[in-house]
Image (cartoon, helix red, strand yellow):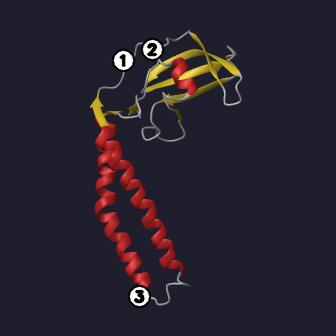
Amino acid sequence: MTQTSDNVTWLTQEAYNQLRAELEHLSGPARAEIAQKIEQAREEGDLKENAGYHAAREEQGKMELRIRQLTQLLERAKVGEAPADNGVVGPGMVVTIAFDGDEDDTATFLLGSREAASGDLETYSPQSPLGRAIDGRSVGDDATYELPNGRKASVRILSAKPYTG
């Protein structure tokens, strides 16, 4: 999955299916389960001092937030193919960069939406300063972007491969 603008999230069919399945689970069985937990905790008596009740309500709030996030994301989603494996940086690519051209100081990350990344793969938005600086550039290119403190940083693109999840 890759996010290419503030209004559209581009997803592979696989990522779309995974997010749709998560939404269906949260909206159905998980919602019923949390409602049951709340009801059971309510039956235990005084709600002011009922830690189980408060924990279940907090869990419900987090789940409802995730349902809203997924619903909005899937409403804006465009399903398409993974990006081409042509060495050009773009959303949906796993990119390795070297800071200041130093190949001992590197970072590897997904350029796209954090919803797509699995495991420990870091994610940078295409709208971030680094994302904008490298988007459309090719392996071997250098790019400069502005850090939050106002300083400039430069990177060299070492590799760009489509994310396979």
How crowded is the residue under tag 2: few (<14 C-alpha within 10 Å), some, or many (20+)? many
Q: Identify the residue position indicated by label 3 in the image.
A: 43
Mark 2 or mark 3: which comes first in sequence?
Answer: 3
Mark 3 burial class by Cα count in 10 Å: few <14, some 14-19, many 20+: few
Q: Tell me which residue sits at (36%, 48%) in the image.
A: 70
Q: Amino acid at mark 1?
A: Ala
Position above or below: 117 against 81: below
Q: Label 3's element?
A: helix
Sort mark 1 into few (<14), some (14-19) or many (20+) by Cα contacts within 10 Å.
Answer: few
Q: Are marks 1 and 2 in contact (CB under 8 Å)?
A: yes
C-alpha gap between disc 2 and disc 3: 59 Å
Q: Residue at x 50, y 78 (%)?
A: 52
Give the spatial CA distance, label 1 vs label 2: 8 Å
Residue under pointer 2: 88
| Foreground pick, 81 / 129 | 129
Q: Nearer the viewer, residue 23 or 61?
A: 61
Name the kind of residue labelled 2 in the image.
Val
CA–CA distance between discs 3 and 1? 57 Å
Q: Residue at x 36, y 73 (%)?
A: 35
On-image quarter of the N terminus: top left
Residue in the picture at 62% in, 20% down? 145
